[in-house]
Image: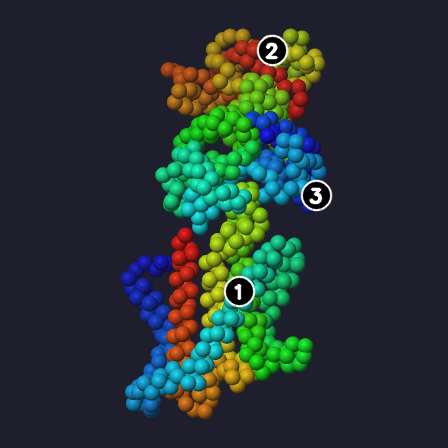
Amino acid sequence: MGIRFDAVTVAYDGNVVLDSLDLAVQAGEVMALLGPSGSGKTTALRAVAGFVRPSAGRVFLGERDVTDLPPYRRGIGMVVQQYALFPHLRVEDNVAFGLKARKVAKTEIRARVAEALEMTGMAAYARRHPRELSGGQQQRVAVARALAIRPDVLLLDEPLSALDARLRSDMLAELARLHRELPDVSILYVTHDQVEALTLADRIAVMDKARLQACGTPRELYRAPANAFTASFVGNANLLPVTVGADGVAFAGAELKVDTAGAARGSKATLCVRPHLVGLGDGPNRLQGTVSEIQWRGSTHRLYVDVDGHRVMADVPELRTPPAHGDEVTLHFAPRDASLLTAGITHG
Amino acid sequence: MLVHSRGTKWAVWALFLVLFLPLFALPLLVVLGASFATHWSSILPSGPTTAHYSAATRGEALQALTTSLVTALAASLIALTVGTWAALAAAALPKRVRRLLDALFVLPVAVPSVVVGLAILVAFSQPPILLNGTRWIVIAAHTVLVTAFAYQSVSAAIVRLDPAYEQAAASLGARPGYVLWRVKLPLLLPSLTAAAGLCFALSMGELSATMMLYPPDWTPLPVLIYAATDRGSLFAGSALAVVLMTATLLVLLAVSRIRTKASYR
């Protein structure tokens, strides 16, 4: 079952926290809502769950308009950052909660609780209380509890934020596996972490300042971001202010060859180049500057190069003799690795 | 601990004992001592006897103890129900209305209990609700006096309750009533039992409003203690006081056992 936002606006006391969101999540699709805090992504999720009431617009689950339905009539599974497991109930009773509330037959409850715990690898912990579990285990139980009601739609609100980095990547793989096992469940995944979004999502909706900034597959957003915000939030990006020329752009007194399709000659635009696609040394599209900082990151060196007052980042494979602070260096990038952003010229 | 050196630790303990003993412990010890005595003319009581206790645990005194226990139990149960209900309802109200409700519930505490007693006496001495001369007027007065505490402690607990639990339950398909019984009340149980204990203890000791209201066949123990000391039977009164204290402490102990069990979960 899909989710559809139809011009959904949410405002508290005239303060707009979600501005006319139009977005459709297909059945069986994983859609990540990616954005910084305060971008409206959690509000959008809570509008689907029924915990905030849109001041305008409608929310659909499949063909059903659920805007006016209370949360308990929506049949949605939800997992939140702090798990919210019921501390007074054992793991099995936490998982059975939704089934008991729906008056499912006892024998079936037992089977479905076992199934959900099996699926999340928590069967051995059924008799424990939540406080006897680690954060990662509690998260698994929260997922099992949400899945036990066999929802068509699963809402995940920053589900991995409270876990440490190692556990997070394990759980990420786990969630991907669960989705393969439940291919019909639509998942709306709210996160501020681009890695989670890029790894898990079929499509990413990038949110900022209460608005949808861009929506597309991770690859589309990464390769050809629609605007500067998307470029800098989905992966790292060098965003250079350029002037569009005949068959390239002018930047810091140099001519750079890039695809200028769709950009008017003489107009101002932003050139987006990913740091790992910038090489050190001579090549096409040269940029010359001085090293302002150099960081060793194990397998790579990150160079910060000052090119005519603009900071350009380059991630290069670990160098045997890295340049020092203040050295003159030449950088280059291939024309096809740059994308020209004509809309939303904001640098920052 | 804020102090680390041995000397200062001892000093703090000494200060604590100097303040604590005379103020809190000694009076209780004196009552305990007096309850076993027939004379107290020198430093220590003399003429040890258990006669006061045999008197304090039968007949009129036993009746008064039962009266007190029944009154306190009824008042605290009603207060807990009403207070919890009101606190739950208040939590869903807009802030301004909630403030008003808070103020209303504090009123019986802010007003001297003698005034509350008088108000209830005047209000229920005439039809349509004629309670004067019955046990119900005592229970009603106690309920009014302790509901404020129940309301306050439960609403404080509700504010601390993470709304995420309620929302998780709702998203799993639980209706508000089911959420209340299966999630909110169980999570509030420690605060509910604490509130019940507080109400019970307050009711067991209530004297000033009770004095104006009690009918002859419903004399709570504090009234009996007052009467005994008033006619000069200090030692008999002390024995009654010890009985009252012990009964109250036993009930509170039982309640706190429920509480530790509830918060362990």
The answer to whether B48 is drawn above or below residue A90 in the figure is below
Hey, what amino acid is under mark 3? Gly
The answer to whether A245 is drawn above or below residue A178 in the figure is above
The answer to whether A286 is drawn above or below residue A95 in the figure is above
Q: Residue at x 60, y 21 (%)?
A: A225
Q: Which residue is mark 2?
A: A258
Q: Which residue is mark 3?
A: A14
Relative side of A319 to B217, left or right: left
Q: Which subunit holds the residue at mark 1?
A: B
**2 or 3: mark nearer the eye:** 3
Across and down, in percent, residue A334 comes to 54, 10
Q: Which mark is residue B80?
A: 1
Q: CA distance from mark 2 to mark 1?
A: 75 Å
Q: Are marks 2 and 1 in contact (CB under 8 Å)?
A: no
Instruction: Looking at the image, tell me whether mark 2 or mark 3 is earlier in sequence order.
Output: 3
Q: Which subunit holds the residue at mark 3?
A: A
Across and down, in percent, residue B126 comes to 66, 81
Q: Residue at x 67, y 22 (%)?
A: A343
